[in-house]
Image: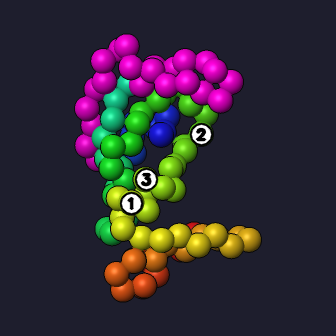
Amino acid sequence: MTPSFELFSTYHHCPSNKKIATTDGTLVIVSGIGDIQINHFITLKRVIHVPKLTMKLVSIQKLTNDLSCSVTFQNDCCIFQDKGVRKDDWTC
């Protein structure tokens, strides 16, 4: 999920009745859904656009399923590896 419309490479508006609940239980409107290209290798699919969010959120489970990769978390970074070849694709 992201509040940033400018990140989307594809975008489809959602009906105004589609909402999500935040951690405090507040319902906020979903404006649209689309894809965000992170780099030449990584595209986040079906990202939800919620303008009222104050930060970007990512589901690691959805990301690893979509990209067919595994992720390892360390103290100061995370490493994404292709499941097929066990090659590091992205380190942050």
Image coordinates of residue 44 in percent, x first then y, are 37, 53
| For residue 5, above or below residue 19 | below
Residue 55, numbered label: 2
Q: Nearer the viewer, mark 1 or mark 2?
A: 1
Name the element at disc 1. Answer: helix
Work out whether residue 81 can be spotted. yes
Mark toward the start of the polypeptide (3 vs 2): 2
Q: Are marks 1 and 2 in contact (CB under 8 Å)?
A: no
| For residue 68, above or below residue 34 | below
Quarter holding residue 24: top right
Q: Looking at the picture, which amino acid does disc 3 mark?
A: Lys
Q: CA distance from mark 3 to mark 2?
A: 18 Å
Instruction: Mark 2: give few (<14), some (14-19) or many (20+) Cα within 10 Å.
Output: few
Which residue corresponds to the image point at 43% horizontal and 62% vertical from the top-left?
Answer: 64
Magenta part of the chain: 9-30
Q: Looking at the picture, which amino acid does disc 1 mark?
A: Asn
Residue 88, numbered label: none
Q: CA distance from mark 1 to mark 3?
A: 5 Å
Label 1 belongs to which residue?
65
Instruction: Mark 1: give few (<14), some (14-19) or many (20+) Cα within 10 Å.
Output: few
Instruction: Mark 3: give few (<14), some (14-19) or many (20+) Cα within 10 Å.
Output: few
Q: Nearer the viewer, mark 3 or mark 2?
A: 3
Name the element at disc 2. Answer: loop
Which residue corresponds to the image point at 59% horizontal and 73% vertical from the top-left?
Answer: 72
Label 3 belongs to which residue?
62
48 within the magenta span? no
Image coordinates of residue 81 in percent, x first then y, are 46, 77
| For residue 37, above or below residue 40 | above
Mark toward the start of the polypeptide (1 vs 2): 2
Q: Are marks 1 and 3 in contact (CB under 8 Å)?
A: yes
Q: Looking at the picture, which amino acid does disc 2 mark?
A: Met
